[in-house]
Image: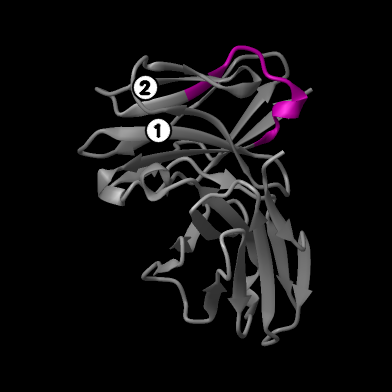
Amino acid sequence: DAMVIQNPRYQVTQFGKPVTLSCSQTLNHNVMYWYQQKSSQAPKLLFHYYDKDFNNEADTPDNFQSRRPNTSFCFLDIRSPGLGDAAMYLCATSSDRTSSYEQYFGPGTRLTVT
Amino acid sequence: AQSVTQLDSQVPVFEEAPVELRCNYSSSVSVYLFWYVQYPNQGLQLLLKYLSGSTLVKGINGFEAEFNKSQTSFHLRKPSVHISDTAEYFCAVSDYNSNYQLIWGAGTKLIIKP
């Protein structure tokens, strides 16, 4: 089945130690998104790629970076994680910008910062 | 600016009873409306969507929602819930002004009592 895969499902990192979360998709979608979701809150869009075109949300901290080396893969890098960055990180895809309302989500990576 | 209001943060209901989860939105243009479900420690799954046409939309797992333009609402209903419906439910809206990105409600936790 075509899907969105996130690895790892659970990640523990130390305060200030860089961490990378990965996402891959077999849907061949042009758009990939990264969301941060804290407990009992709605997902918050961090950034998205339309193909190789990177779009950062205005309030996304500089501590968060992303890479998309090809259509299938997208990475979220947190350069110096703080305790406040502990959250679920969700990757999503959509086929095109004009259908960006219809998104397919991965299972998420739960990040713990110690 | 667009916004989505889910009036209830938690809705407890007995198993096999009916349930309604409320969602109101603000938008001055034509909208697309969505309900997503998130099971514990999982990503989000699209439950149903309204893009155009019939205002009564049927989704997966026996859920349905009705678009009411005059009341700017898109309430989610199920006639008889099961323990497996325990999850968090998010309403989302998308329109031209948001570049078709999803604007999320805060979520409603559906708690099924045996």
Asked whether B89 or B113 is in front, the reply is: B89
The span picked out in magenta is: B76-87
Residue placed under numbered mark 2 in the picture: B67
* Within-10-Å neighbours for mark 1: few <14, some 14–19, many 20+: many
Q: Is residue A43 magenta?
A: no
Q: At 36% across and 34% down in the image, what residue appears?
A: B32
Residue B95 appears in which quarter of the rendering?
Answer: top left
Circle 2 chain: B
Q: Are marks 1 and 2 on the same chain?
A: yes
Residue placed under numbered mark 1 in the picture: B33
Circle 1 chain: B
Residue type of the residue flagged with mark 1: Leu
* Relative vertical location of residue A84 with respect to residue B5 in this rendering, above or below: below
> Is residue B92 toward the left or the right of residue A22 in the image?
left
Q: At 69% across and 50% down in the image, what residue appears?
A: A107
SS class of the residue under badge 1? strand
Residue type of the residue flagged with mark 2: Phe
**Which of the colour schemes (rainbow, by chain, secondary structure, one colour) is used?**
one colour
Q: At 40% across and 67% down in the image, what residue appears?
A: A55
Asked whether A99 or B29 is in front, the reply is: A99
Give percent across and percent down for residue A101: 42, 42
Residue B6 appears in which quarter of the rendering?
Answer: top left
Asked whether A27 or A77 is in front, the reply is: A27
Give percent across and percent down for residue B81: 68, 19
* Within-10-Å neighbours for mark 2: few <14, some 14–19, many 20+: many
Q: CA distance from mark 1 to mark 2?
A: 8 Å
* Relative vertical location of residue B22 with respect to residue A94 in this rendering, above or below: above
Between discs 1 and 2, the one toward the N terminus = 1
Please say whether residue A28 is visible from this viewpoint.
yes
Q: Are marks 1 and 2 in contact (CB under 8 Å)?
A: yes
